[in-house]
Amino acid sequence: MTQYLAISPKECQGLAWHPPSDVSFMATQPLVPLHAGELAKAASSMPLALIREGREWKLVGVAGFQPNHNLFIKEGKWVGSYQPQALTTWPFVVVNVGEKGIMALDRESGVLAASVDEPGAEPFFDSHGEPASALQAVLAILKANHAKQQATQRALAALNTAGVITPWPENLITSVGMQVRGLHMINEQALAQLESDAFLTLRKAQALPIAYALNLSLQQTHLLTRLARLNPGSVAAPENLDKLFGEGDDELTFDFDS
């Protein structure tokens, strides 16, 4: 279980941290957390998927074919056209305690300094108990995104209740050589066959944009293939991916009954 440090003047008194200088911390993570506010830019930059964590579903960007290799990160730099906001706020998160969100830091991230005098270390708070500049920048992004993340979770819960979440098709997984497991999308047939009330519930939960973006984004697997040739891990990119989707094919459908 992740050990968190609550970010407050009391808990962080005398403590400091090292803001990351690049995004190499995510280089071994092929799944990048997203929220619905990033849908438009993220869906045009990478495949999206849903994964289950405990009892909840999470929206992620699929950034690699292998469990330990992020194709979008090379030499510590993000090479994609859109960098997810989770990379900007790492290793800080908002932990929900009841109806209240508490900003916290992952103690196992390795960014905690041994002392405030350590070279390159930044204090969490100044002498007046106010967030120091480095922390203030992260805090502003987390605050701005908190409502979006909550709305995302409500939308994913609605999709789950509607019974329209389904695993990525096995033929797609095999064809692209996907080794990252647990990826899910939306069953378009099940979505189309929902009763009016159930469909309206999804619309009210703002779940429909996520549903559509998830499936449409799968065509971005083309981009993963190209990145795998430029930034290879231990497995070469499949050569037949273009044949699977078809050049210039604007529509993406799967047979969920096969």
Image (spheres, rainbow, N blue to C red):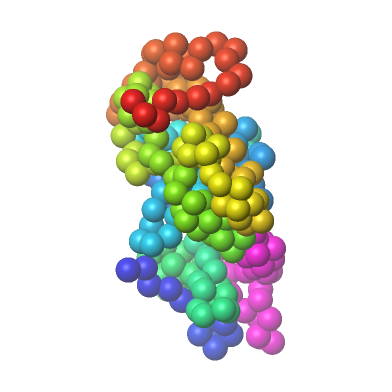
From what the image shows, is residue 74 above or below residue 103? above
Does residue 150 appear anywhere in the picture? yes
Q: Which quadrant would the N terminus be assigned to in this image?
A: bottom left
Q: Position of residue 220 (x, y in %)?
A: 54, 28
Q: Position of residue 6 (x, y in %)?
A: 50, 78
Q: Residue at x 57, y 15 (%)?
A: 249
Q: Position of residue 149 (x, y in %)?
A: 59, 60
Left or right of 80 on screen, residue 189: left
From what the image shows, is residue 8 above or below residue 258? below
Q: Which quadrant would the C terminus be assigned to in this image?
A: top left
Q: Residue at x 57, y 78 (%)?
A: 99
| Residues rendered magenta in the picture | 120-148
Seen from the viewer's position, the closer of residues 96 and 233 is 96
Q: Which quadrant of the view contains residue 66?
A: top left
Residue 129 within the segment the image draws in magenta: yes
Seen from the viewer's position, the closer of residues 118 and 167 is 167
From what the image shows, is residue 117 above or below residue 177? below
Q: Residue at x 66, y 56 (%)?
A: 204
Seen from the viewer's position, the closer of residues 39 and 200 is 200
Left or right of 29 on screen, residue 192: right
Residue 135 within the segment the image draws in magenta: yes
